[in-house]
Image: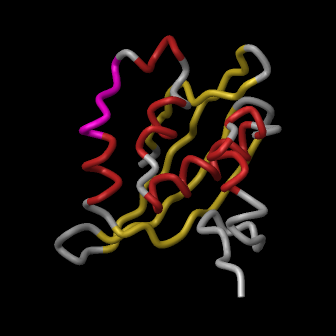
Amino acid sequence: MKQLCPCGSGESYQDCCNRIHENPKAAASAEQLMRARYTAFCLQHIDFLYDTFHPQTRRYQQKAAIAAWAKENQWQELQIIQASVSRVEFKAYYIDRSGDLHVHHEKSAFKQLNSQWYYVDGEIKG
């Protein structure tokens, strides 16, 4: 039996986010990249997370901080609230190292550059 993709699409990981992890240009939309990035947090694909930051904002990121955020939390569920061409509002549920459940609610901005989607930044919602 194939492993379901952590992004919640209902597809197998192999048929869903894995193809984007192997080739980021395979993301046909901002939402697909968002789902692949969530799954990368679940599976701790730190290079993918770093590399899919838009070049304008990537320089402000640190792989060690991304890795710590991915590893210290147990990612439970992704809910897409609303998606447009270049924005995705989502809730990511996770359990921290103390065992407490949290919700990361964000409205993310994405841009396409050379036929590839990139994460630019996000506005954290209350």
**In this figure, what is the number of numbered marks?**
0
- Range of residues picked out in magenta: 60-65
In this rendering, position of residue 72 left or right of residue 1: left
Quadrant of res 61 = top left
Percent across and percent down for residue 88 are 66, 42
* x 53%, y 70%: residue: 77
Q: Vertically, is 10 above or below 81? A: below
Quadrant of res 114 = top right
Q: How is the image coloured?
A: secondary structure
Would residue 84 be counted in the magenta stretch? no
Which of 99/27 is in front?
Answer: 27
* x 33%, y 41%: residue: 66
Percent across and percent down for residue 126 are 41, 49
Percent across and percent down for residue 18 are 66, 55
> Looking at the figure, which quarter contains the N terminus?
bottom right
Quadrant of res 8 = bottom right
